Image (spheres, grey):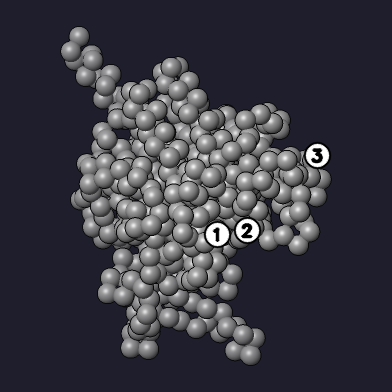
């Protein structure tokens, strides 16, 4: 009986529950565990103390949609046509974590912002939904998620479906903060929450949006535990993407700050509260020990240096491939595997989620399509300190290539330069804030990395042309694990 019990326990440890939490536009410096002394994030700070903090964690892109696709495919978004926000969609030929885990007996759920395709063909919705965006229809339920509570794109972080009536009459998208503007003088924001059946969800949508999301995610987790099935839960908060709005109990925590800062800081604290609620629910259900709980942001903070969101001193912000645009907060709490109060300088990325999770389950991809991520298991265990596989980035006219030490940035200059590449090189170990361009004195390194970057870009281009896919849709074939 003892042997049987041990074997069953070992088998369970090999199939951990998985939760991927992601914020929207949260800067590296917007959390207490990265040194912020103003914004209250006690639950995230406790999560950092209970697990591993990634000091160099990268979003795959400096804007939201591309990064989100990288999370569930392990591939750079330029491989499948999601080059920027509100462009492209998840193609049916792409293989997602949800699809692969579904075949392994997992329950799968998506909660929050999707932004990888439209969610309705009939009703005008958000940025692209409805008849005008039919070609981009690709909701979570067609990408492996059994349970959904999803929006196409951004929503206000308080009363997520509503906006003051005077908003369209010259009102700023940041300035509807007074509580009286959120009581009777409201109109529909123009977006919706949708479930896995493609039906609009209309109940329980007032108040804090992070709480609205968690009200759906926690019951999904609890029902999965009761059914004794492992679960894969993607929780993608809208916080703190504009429009940032916080309830009075959260703005009161930041009296003396400007209205904008009160609501920016307040909505982050409101989200942190819900992460604490999630961690408590995991412990109460007995599933915390065997759950991989990941946390990150999709890109750097919005606005300029005077905006509330902070990069922690890193250069650049959202939409930039400098560190401030792509280096984001990163955590992993997994009590059965990760020791408390650990941290790593190993460069990790959202493209690493899929290969790390599949390796943990001893699952291989069903074909040889290129992935850009690596298995982080050895780095998580502290056995590997240096990343051998470089990280490539593309966005707009910029591309970059990040090794463990160096970062090469390539910029396409004006037409007068005939599209010539201009290179910058930074030693991220000595100069993480990218203040000293050492390209002129390190021409051999620039040449080597530029060749590798060009090779990687060509590989992405081949993928984008459909060269990775078999003739039949991968989603309808029975060649999964």
Disc 3 to disc 2, C-alpha distance: 30 Å
Q: Secondary structure at mark 1?
A: helix
Is residue 167 visible in the rendered structure shown here?
Answer: yes
Q: Is residue 441 left or right of residue 198?
A: left
The mark lying in front, picked from 1 and 3, is: 1
Per the image, the residue denoted by label 2 is: 174
Among the two numbered marks 1 and 3 on one chain, the one whose residue lies closer to the N terminus: 3
Q: Residue at x 52, y 82 (%)?
A: 421
- Whether 266 is drawn above or below 15: the answer is below
Image coordinates for residue 119, horizontal then vertical, percent: 69, 41
Among the two numbered marks 3 and 2 on one chain, the one whose residue lies closer to the N terminus: 3
Mark 1–mark 2 contact, CB under 8 Å? Answer: yes
Q: Residue at x 45, y 38 (%)?
A: 274
Image coordinates for residue 449, horizontal then vertical, percent: 39, 74
Q: Secondary structure at mark 3?
A: loop
* Residue extending farthest top: 1
- Whether 24 is drawn above or below 321: the answer is above
Residue 18 shows which numbered tag? none
How many numbered circles are shown? Answer: 3
Image coordinates for residue 300, horizontal then vertical, percent: 48, 61
Residue 260 shows which numbered tag? 1
Q: Report the front residue among 294 and 166.
A: 166
Disc 1 to disc 3, C-alpha distance: 36 Å
Q: Residue at x 54, y 47 (%)?
A: 246
Is residue 118 visible in the rendered structure shown here?
Answer: no
Q: Report the front residue among 382 and 298.
A: 298
Q: Report the front residue among 97 and 332.
A: 332
Per the image, the residue denoted by label 3 is: 122
């Amino acid at each position: 009986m003892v042997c049987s019990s041990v074997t069953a326990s070992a088998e369970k440890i090999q199939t951990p529950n998985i939760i991927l939490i992601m914020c929207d536009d949260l800067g590296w410096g917007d959390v207490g565990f990265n040194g912020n002394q103003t914004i209250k994030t006690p639950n995230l700070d406790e999560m950092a103390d209970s697990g591993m903090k990634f000091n160099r964690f990268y979003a795959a892109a400096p804007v939201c949609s591309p990064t989100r696709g990288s999370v569930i495919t392990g591939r750079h978004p330029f491989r499948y046509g999601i080059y920027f926000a509100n462009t492209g969609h998840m193609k049916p030929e792409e293989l997602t974590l949800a699809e692969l885990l579904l075949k392994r007996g997992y329950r799968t759920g998506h909660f929050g912002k999707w932004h990888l395709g439209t969610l309705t063909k009939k009703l005008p919705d958000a940025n692209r939904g409805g008849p005008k965006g039919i070609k981009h229809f690709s909701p979570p339920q067609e990408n492996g998620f059994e349970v959904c509570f999803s929006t196409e794109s951004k929503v206000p972080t308080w009363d997520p479906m509503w906006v003051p009536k005077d908003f369209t009459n010259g009102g700023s998208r940041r300035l509807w903060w007074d509580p009286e503007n959120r009581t009777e003088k409201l109109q529909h924001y123009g977006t919706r929450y949708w479930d896995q059946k493609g039906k609009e969800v209309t109940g329980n949508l007032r108040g804090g949006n992070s709480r609205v999301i968690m009200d759906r995610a926690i019951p999904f987790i609890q029902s999965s535990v009761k059914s004794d099935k492992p679960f894969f839960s993607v929780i993608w908060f809208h916080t703190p993407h504009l429009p940032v709005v916080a309830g009075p109990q959260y703005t009161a925590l930041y009296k003396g700050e400007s209205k904008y800062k009160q609501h920016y800081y307040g909505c982050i604290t409101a989200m942190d509260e819900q992460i604490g609620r999630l961690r408590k629910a995991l412990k109460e259900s007995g599933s915390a020990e065997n759950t991989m709980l990941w946390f990150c942001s999709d890109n750097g903070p919005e606005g300029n240096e005077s905006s509330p969101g902070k990069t922690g001193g890193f250069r650049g912000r959202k939409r930039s491939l400098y560190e401030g645009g792509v280096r984001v907060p990163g955590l992993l709490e997994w009590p059965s595997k990760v020791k408390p109060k650990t941290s790593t300088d190993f460069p990790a990325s959202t493209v690493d989620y899929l290969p790390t999770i599949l390796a943990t389950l001893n699952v291989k991809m069903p074909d040889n399509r290129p992935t850009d991520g690596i298995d982080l298991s050895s780095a998580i265990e502290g056995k590997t300190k240096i990343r051998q596989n470089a990280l490539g980035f593309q966005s707009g006219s910029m591309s970059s290539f990040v090794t463990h030490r160096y970062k090469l940035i390539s910029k396409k200059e004006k037409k007068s330069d005939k599209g010539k590449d201009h290179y910058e090189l930074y030693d991220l170990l000595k100069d993480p804030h990218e203040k000293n361009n050492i390209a002129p004195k390190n021409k051999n390194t620039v040449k080597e990395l530029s060749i590798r970057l060009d090779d990687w870009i060509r590989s992405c281009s081949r993928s984008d042309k459909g060269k990775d896919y078999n003739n039949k849709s991968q989603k309808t074939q029975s060649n999964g694990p």
